Amino acid sequence: MLKMPQQQYIRFLREAEGCSIQEIADRVGVHWRTAKKYADQDNWNLRMTNRKSRSPVMGPYMEIVDAWLEEDRLLPRKQRHTAARIFQRLRDEYQFPGSERTVSTYVKRRRTEMELERAKTYERLEHPPGEAQADFTTMEVCQNQKLVSYKLFVLSFPYSNAAFVYPVPSENQECFLEAMKQVFDQTGGVPQRIWFDNLSAAVVHIEKQGERQLTDMFRRFCAHYRFEAVFCNPYSGHEKGHVETKCGYSKRNWAVPIPLFTSQEQLTAHFTDQAEQDRKRHHYVKERQIEELWQEEERRHLLQLPEEPFEAFRLQTAVVNKYGEIQVDDAVIPLLGQASPGTEVMAQLFWDRIVVLDHRHEPMRTVPRPYTGKTADIPWSQVFAGWLRKPRSVTHSQFLRISGGKICRLSQNIWR
């Protein structure tokens, strides 16, 4: 093949000077067929043709080597064929005429191709507006100078990347449904479809065919708010990967440093404000503000809230003991003067309180629900030891904020 300047010169001689094919061949010094090819060529597009792989030596043995390499996947790594061993077997068993280098080159290329063939491929999922994913994440918060394990319910919308959250002390059914109800109030509507994992607050049992046996209260909650509940396959959290990522994001960004709170309302306001501020950043792909996408494109796809909110509670019976007490949800509730020993009463368990009802279902007493969430004492001796080593770090330490007014008394104990 002639170089491009020679091809252009032949074309110039033909078009501009009107030379014949033989004259062009004589002046350029090429065969007349070559001169005619480029002089009269009309299509100058670059042609991409498939390259033919020619392996005259290796060709008849490729299937044998491929079979050995496939079988090696089933064997321990130290008992798999090396390129040298493949060459030896081909030479001894099949009278292979080539060299070891030829075999090594082919084996290296085929192993790379086979890895690519087995590599996982992923599809970019399209999420319609109005579809959400839900999950809990666990984080540490500080209450009364103690670290408390708290749950943050996260409802994320993959289309706009918006997220709404609500903190609760547990993942039980009452807290789960209360958190969803509160988040629906924040969004001003209900997602048409919500993805869940198989949490016990919603799923009683998974049948062999994959059908879910749902709890009665969760069924009524879905019917009340008219959304479709979709559940992931067991141990397949990646199927709702957006909310999984959002849970980690919220823990790293909204719970650092450790939030301090004295009431549920204060903790709720903290996380609600954090989520609201986060929606003011730009979407990672669509280059528009998340809040703008949420308000203009996604919110209008939500279902309307019902007129009456759902009341999530569980009923439990209890018998008054000889001390005039009942035990409900690990809480001992005295009923002296209100119910005689041996009387059966009904307890109404809401997410944040227990209401004791008499035989007419009239409230007798209401007590806060005693969540005994995991708590951990802060290792103050180690904290103070660190402060002694680096005194300038004291004013920047989050433990200074956590300690509140007790820091002076704690420091005196350490110095003793």
Image (cartoon, grey):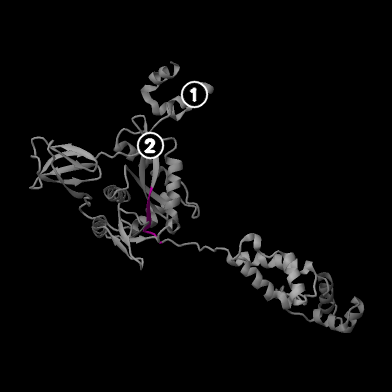
**Residue 385: which disc?**
1
**Residue 141: which disc?**
2
Name the one closer to the observer, 53 or 126: 53
Q: Is mark 2 on a helix, strand or loop?
A: strand
Name the one closer to the observer, 64 or 283: 64
**What range of the chain is rendered magenta?**
128-136
Q: Which residue is drawn at 17% across and 39% down?
A: 366
Name the one closer to the observer, 37 or 311: 311
Rendering coords of residue 308 (x, y %): 20, 52
Name the one closer to the observer, 209 or 311: 209
Q: Which residue is drawn at 50% across and 54% down?
A: 285
Q: Residue at x 37, y 25 (%)?
A: 404
Classify residue 14 by image quadrant.
bottom right
Classify residue 108 by image quadrant.
bottom right
Rendering coords of residue 334 (x, y %): 15, 36
Instruction: Give the spatial CA distance, label 1 vs label 2.
Output: 23 Å
Q: Residue at x 50, y 62 (%)?
A: 124
Horizontal side of residue 300 vs 381, given as left or right: left
Horizontal side of residue 194 vs 2, given as left or right: left
Res 258 seen here:
yes
Res 20 seen here:
no
Circle 2 crowding by C-alpha within 10 Å: few under 14, some 14–19, many from 20: many
* Residue 132 falls within the magenta-colored stretch: yes
Rendering coords of residue 75 (x, y %): 61, 64
Classify residue 84 by image quadrant.
bottom right
